[in-house]
Image (cartoon, rainbow, N blue to C red):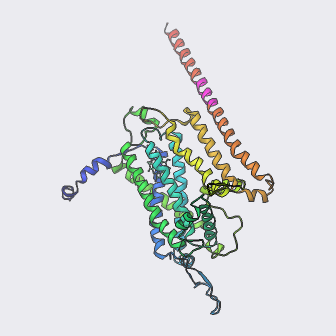
Amino acid sequence: MNQWLDERLHLSRLNDKFLRKAFPVHHSFFLGEITLFSLVILILTGILLALSFEPSNTLVVNSFDPGTADKPNMIPAAYHSVLKINAMPFGDLLRRIHHWCANIMVAASVIHMMRIYFTGAFKKPREINWWIGLLAMIFAALTAITGYILPYDNYAYNTVKVVYGITASVPWVGPWLAQAVFAGNFPGDGIIPRIYGYHIMLLPMILLATVGAHMLIMIKQKHTQPQYAKRLAYKKIVGVPLMTQQTPIMILLLLLLAGLVMLFSAFVPVHPVEYFGPPSTTPINNIKPDWYLLWVFGALAIIPSFEFHVLGGIIGSEFTGAMLFPAIPLGLLFLVPLLDRSKENMYYAENPTNHPVRLAAGVAFLAFMLILSLAGYKPDLISAGVLKSESANAVLWILVFVVPAVAYFATMAIVRGIGRLHAANERERAAHALHDDAHGAHSHD
Ligand code: HEM
């Protein structure tokens, strides 16, 4: 059978090329795999959800609460189909697994990126894979955001309203762009079919293409090697082959992830559509995006209101806070591989504390994003009495720049302190060794 297949499909060549690939044995290399496996679970649960979801915002009678013949209770078909999914056996569980996996995928890709950054794995020759990975992360977040809009409850309705406003605020082309993206004026009949197309076709296809390219490049360039590989066999690839050792480990990881997500989903509900209700003109107080978008929301919350008229276009605070300002941290992430000028290919994952400036800059960047995310809670901080409404913006802006600076210098001081401690220990050990040698030589005499 093997020979029969091989004569036709040349499978043994595939085996030599891909299945013998060595995988480093180190837990930090599971982060990329967790991201990948969340994507697998998302696709499987997404296909099942699509079988019962109705991508339309046309109004239909609510079969759970039909109202009266004179005054039927009309709700969008998409919202109605989500209520129906919730009422199906395992329907609610399926929604929860899909939702939590979206969060895990974005979180795992962020932590995976941190591993790559802090160990220097973005250096030559892996710069292209850093850029492709970043694109994959951005498209993963976009896919998740479009998913939030699909149930078309009042939360989704208000979210689209905000995002429509931001898109329309782009100078010169904004209104035209918003109509093109959202299939007409807000809230048009075409919104849900359009967002559905983005969520189940356009964005997943781009995501799969970027993740596929990411994997092929990673196989071609091979993983960076953990430090222990240097001691075992210098400049040789140390690891277990994909077939047969790494594959069972990966299957185990996938099953473990699926099991944990299922257990978590059984107890922790997701976005409660019934709580928000169908779209209504009553705005929801204090609406917030998911955690990974809070930093953009925070920037928008603290930017002062202004408007410049330039060549017939308007550059306002909405466009600056939600688009221009967030482009700075994303742009910095794209620039990361260009900061390193080494001519040699990078082989071994580096110890983060041996690169204090890189480590401190990374910690400062994380602090910057955290404080901006905190700014997203401005109304809550004011109502809890932590901030005064007159000075909240100024205080938060100061924190946005001061906390990262403090984080930078504190990290540098800690790393240098640890370095000095290590050096002192080394000196003491060397002095002891010298003393023991001298003592040994004495007793021989
Ligand atoms: C969003 C979807 C992503 C998926 C599914 C994914 C998946 C993976 C996997 C499975 C690996 C091999 C195992 C590992 O090194 O952990 C890997 C390696 C790598 N990834 Fe990603 N990744 C994603 C995002 C990112 C991001 C956001 C970046 C950086 C900005 C990135 C940069 C890299 C690099 C440079 C490598 C090679 C690392 C090395 O050889 O040590 N990836 N990725």
122 horizontally vs 294: left or right: left
The x, y position of residue 79, in whole percent, is 57, 76
> What secondary structure prevails in the magenta region?
helix
Residue positioned 64% across, 92% down in the render:
70
Residue 294 visible somewhere in the drawing: no
Looking at the picture, tell me which residue is in the foreground, 370 or 402: 402
User: Does the rendering let one see residue 227?
Assistant: yes
Q: Is residue 70 placed above or below 420 in the rendered structure? A: below
In this view, the residue farthest toward the bottom is: 69
Asked if residue 363 is among those painted magenta in the image, a careful observer would answer no
Residue 136 is left or right of residue 83, and the answer is left
Residue 257 on image: x %, y %? 49, 58
Q: Position of residue 236 (x, y in %)?
A: 36, 35
- Looking at the rendering, the stretch of residues picked out in magenta corresponds to 416-425
Quadrant of the rendered structure where residue 285 is? bottom right
Question: In the image shown, does 242 or 388 lie closer to the viewer?
Answer: 388
The quadrant of the rendering that contains the N terminus is bottom left
